[in-house]
Amino acid sequence: MREAVARHFPAETRTSHPQGGYVLGVELPGNIDTADLHVRAIAEGLAFVPGELFSASGIYRNCLRLNCGNPMTPEIEDAVRRLGKLIEQAAQKKVMCATEIWKNSHRVESRTPPLVSTHPRPRRRMGDRAV
C-alpha cells in the first residue's frame, strides 16, 4: 500500500511506517482538507477515514487513514490511483466544497405536495396508547 501511495499521491505526501496493524497513516500537503475530500471520494465510490476524526482539537485536517489489511490487488491499486487524482484536484483547488457536492447529490425536484395524504393513518381514540 505504501508503494501505491508513493506512486499515485503528490510527492510531498508522507506515510507512516506501521509495525503492525491494518491502517496506514497518510499526511497530505497542508492545503488539502481531507473532510471535504472524503465527501468527494465517497461520491466516487472510494473510502478512507479523515484524520481530524482522530483528534478532539480538529488537527490532522490534511491527514487520512487507509485500510491496508488486504493483499494488494489491481482493484486496490486502481482505487489508490483514483484517490490520488482526487487529491491532485484538491491541491489545485478544483474540488467543489463539501456543501456544493452535498447539495448536488441531494437535489430534489420542486413540486407541490399533495393536499391529502395518500397513506392511511390509523385512527386513535382518546385513551388509546400510542404504539
Image (cartoon, rainbow, N blue to C red):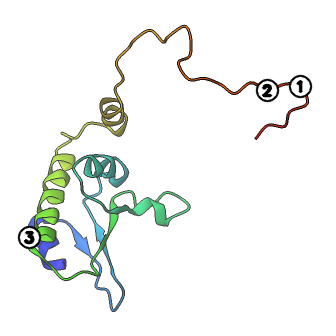
Q: Is residue 30 left or right of residue 117?
A: left
Residue beneath label 3, please? 7
Residue beneath label 1, please? 126
Q: Please give the name of the residue rendered at 74% of the width and 24% of the height, measured from the top-left corner.
A: 123
Instruction: Return the residue nearer the eye: 91 or 49.
Output: 49
Q: Nearer the viewer, mark 2 or mark 3?
A: 2
Residue beneath label 2, please? 124
Label 1 secondary element = loop
Q: Is residue 76 above or below residue 33?
A: below
| Quadrant the C terminus occupies | top right
Q: What's under tag 3, amino acid-wise?
A: Arg
Residue 89 x %, y %: 16, 47
- The crowding category of the residue bearing disc 2, from other C-alpha atoms within 10 Å (few below 14, some 14 to 19, many at least 20), is few
Q: Please give the name of the residue rendered at 51% of the width and 64% of the height, measured from the top-left corner.
A: 55
Q: What's under tag 2, amino acid-wise?
A: Arg
Is residue 3 among the parts visible in the rendering?
yes
Q: Is residue 38 above or below residue 131?
A: below
Label 3 secondary element = helix
Residue 79's label in the rendered image is none
Q: Please give the name of the residue rendered at 86% of the width and 33% of the height, measured from the top-left corner.
A: 128
- The crowding category of the residue bearing disc 3, from other C-alpha atoms within 10 Å (few below 14, some 14 to 19, many at least 20), is some
- Spatial CA span between label 2 and label 3: 65 Å
Q: Please give the name of the residue rendered at 19% of the width and 78% of the height, measured from the top-left corner.
A: 2
Q: Is residue 75 left or right of residue 123?
A: left
Label 2 secondary element = loop
Q: Is residue 35 left or right of residue 11?
A: right
Pick whichever of labels 3 and 1 is earlier in the sequence. 3
